[in-house]
Amino acid sequence: MVDRGTLLCSSEDRTVDRILTLLASVGRADQAHPHVRRWGVPVLCAALGLQPLMEYPGPGPALPVTLGLLAGITVPLLWRQSRPVLVFAVVTGFSVAEAACGVLTNAHFLAQLVMLYNLARFATPLALAGAVSVAVPQTLVTVLAFSSDVQLKRITSALALAVMLTICMIAMAGLGLGGRVARLYITALQDRAVRLEVERDQRARLAEAAERARISREMHDILGHTLAVMVGLADGAAGLAEASPKRGAETLRTIADSGRGALADLRRLLGTLRENGTASCDSPLAPQPGLTDLDALLERVRAAGPTVTLHTEGDLAGLPAGLQLTVYRIVQEALTNTLKHAALATTIDVAVVATSRGVRVAVEDSGPPRAPRKRPRNDGGQGLLGMRERAALYQGTVTAGPNSRGGWSVRAELHLVPPTNTPTEKYLA
């Protein structure tokens, strides 16, 4: 769970949070032992009601009647939370009956205070306002009516007692409202913490998915290209084994070097994974290739057999690193596609043109196909999909299809804009 302390910045917020936490702990203890408070309040009211009857057994109704009135005031308090309005009406009725019979106890004063608190906590504001408008006048009338009673002679002024009880009633109503607001605040804070935890988990899953996509994309681009070159070299080496053993041996050494490079790239990619199996977003896949590495890329393709030419225009070195990487990967994937599908004797023309608005890339081969194609090259595979996703980061487009030379063309147009800042796209480059 998200710690509430991390959500609060100021010291005042933390102080309020401590108070609310204390109230919440008290509430949890109360929920763990609900019978203690439920029965404790009625018993306390009954004890306060019996105490004056024992100390001042003056004239009045018979004891059973007095005890019945006292029970009518205290017993309904057991349902003060579930039926606050009904219990207040019953307690008020018995309090009036008690005063009419000439009995004055402290039970109905305390019971009314308790009921005003529960009305503020669990009833509507309209019900609370009605209860206060009934309880305050009743209390004033009762105190003034019993001002000559022996119990009140110890008080200097019955009016002072009436004012004090009125203030207590209003205070209890306010305390109940405060408890209600605190409960709502705690609930809202807990809901917010739950939402933040869910959002945190969602962000973590998105980051992991984005990192998996980054690893998958790099493995496809790097290893796919290297393996395609190795397959082309192996085909050539098989034909040279008898006719030109020396040249065949050189070709095999080139295959070995390509394989070692692929293994190094694989170790570097897998090294970005954490020990627990999840991807680390902070682990860069550096050093990343740029347009200055195109010559080395084309040289590896030439070693596999095709004739490759490169034509460049504009200030390629001044392009952003991310854009250079995108262009490099598009060219690399297009060359890999040619090695997979075209004959080794094909001719490949690569053109990269930098303008003030962006970069244009074109990779064309002359064919012919290596073997009858079971499906076209633009079949929606991972290669073409990857090129289009990379181009989309720079608001670009990629098109692919057959050309007039009997081969295949891949064209891309990218714009000089920063990559869009979304969790998934952040790592595609």
Image (cartoon, helix red, strand yellow):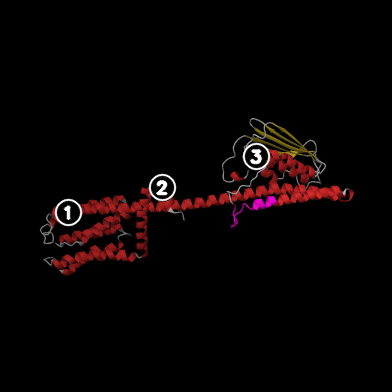
Which residue corresponds to the image point at 67% horizontal and 44% vertical from the top-left? Answer: 386
Badge 1 element: helix
List the residue tagged with mark 2.
Answer: 9
- The x and y percentages for residue 247 are 85, 47
**Is 420 on the left-hand or right-hand side of 383?**
left
Badge 3 element: helix
Q: Does residue 270 belong to the magenta stretch?
A: yes
List the residue tagged with mark 1.
Answer: 162
Quadrant the C terminus occupies = top right
**Is 319 on the left-hand or right-hand side of 77?**
right
- The x and y percentages for residue 392 are 63, 40
Magenta residue span: 264-279
Q: Residues within 10 Å of mark 1 (few under 14, many from 20)?
A: some
Position of 377 relative to 159 (above/below):
above
Which residue corresponds to the image point at 61% horizontal and 53% vertical from the top-left? Answer: 273
- Amino acid at the residue labelled 3: Ala
Q: Which of marks 1 and 3 is nearer the N terminus?
A: 1
Which residue corresponds to the image point at 29% horizontal and 66% vertical from the top-left? Answer: 39
